[in-house]
Image (tube, rainbow, N blue to C red):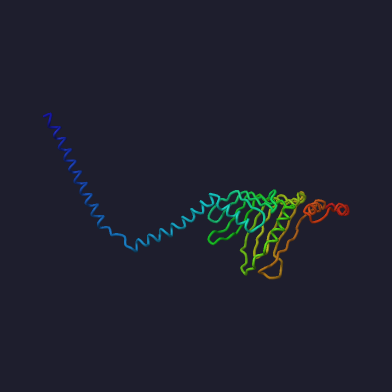
Amino acid sequence: RRDYPIQSVGASVHADKKASLSITHAVCRLSLGSRSDTPAMTKRGRLRLIIVLVVLGVPVLVCMGAILFVANGGLESRLEREYAARFPGRLTIGHIELAGANQAVAHDLRLYGPAGGDEVVRIATADLVGGIFPPRLERIAVHGLNLRFDRDGVEFVKAFLALPRPQPTSTAPPRIRLEVDGEIAVAQRVVLSSLKLAVDCDRWSLAGHLVAQLGGQPFELNMSPAPGGDPQRRPSQIRIAAATVDLADLFAAITALGFLPPQDDLLAWLPKQ
């Protein structure tokens, strides 16, 4: 009687093992049978799969490469070299970051004159909005502009004007929106502070306005295409809407730029503003 329960348990365990093995064997036979019934991928199907992988994979690889190129500072170095090969002076760029598929933000831009020294232009950030395919530029937003126009600036402008002019083309340049805020100092005597510029450049003409503070007084310019003339190359007209200029500062700035000798005798005969 004591051995009977043990034998019964052993028999049931043995029976469970046989049933389990039988079920597993049946499942394996069903799996093998289903695999043999699956048709193999045709040559045309493999070709379609390769085409899909290429079409989807190439843009992803290009985007990843562009992101790595920008992240490693390659774009900044490339732009600095391109500027040095075409224009006077030297341009340095802190870093550039992508803010989407159609926007890039450049930080800490500095432009030096041909003679070196301090920077002539310093920009905190510049937003460049456009497109990559095809490459186009639609809007430039400059924030934190600090333009120092003195003798270094004069030499830079002379070197820039001495560059060979490009060959004229029949294709009109694209329309670009330019927005600027910052400060412009002419020989540290005529300073436009709290400057805000918004202008549209379209077919070599300008349309927009500039507002600033000059010596604590409002300063405002309006720009618009001039009437008449060739509509493809219409010049621009600039109107001074509001300006109060200290003549002593104005002549001091012109003298500091090297355009005039000192005018102390003349200033005695002129009004102050």
- At x 67%, y 56%, the residue is 88
Spot occupied by residue 55 in the image (x, y as percentages of width and height): 43, 60
Spot occupied by residue 122 in the image (x, y as percentages of width and height): 66, 50
Residue 12: quadrant of the picture: top left
Spot occupied by residue 129 in the image (x, y as percentages of width and height): 58, 56
The N terminus appears in which quarter of the rendering? Answer: top left
Which residue is at the front of the view, 211 or 25? 25
Residue 8: quadrant of the picture: top left
- Judge left or right: residue 173 versus residue 150: left
Which residue is at the front of the view, 224 or 167? 167
Spot occupied by residue 145 in the image (x, y as percentages of width and height): 67, 51
| Vertical position of residue 219 compared to residue 18: above or below | below
Q: Residue furthest left?
A: 1
Residue 203: quadrant of the picture: bottom right
| Vertical position of residue 14 compared to residue 157: above or below | above
- Judge left or right: residue 269 versus residue 153: right
- At x 63%, y 56%, the residue is 84
Number of labelled discs?
0
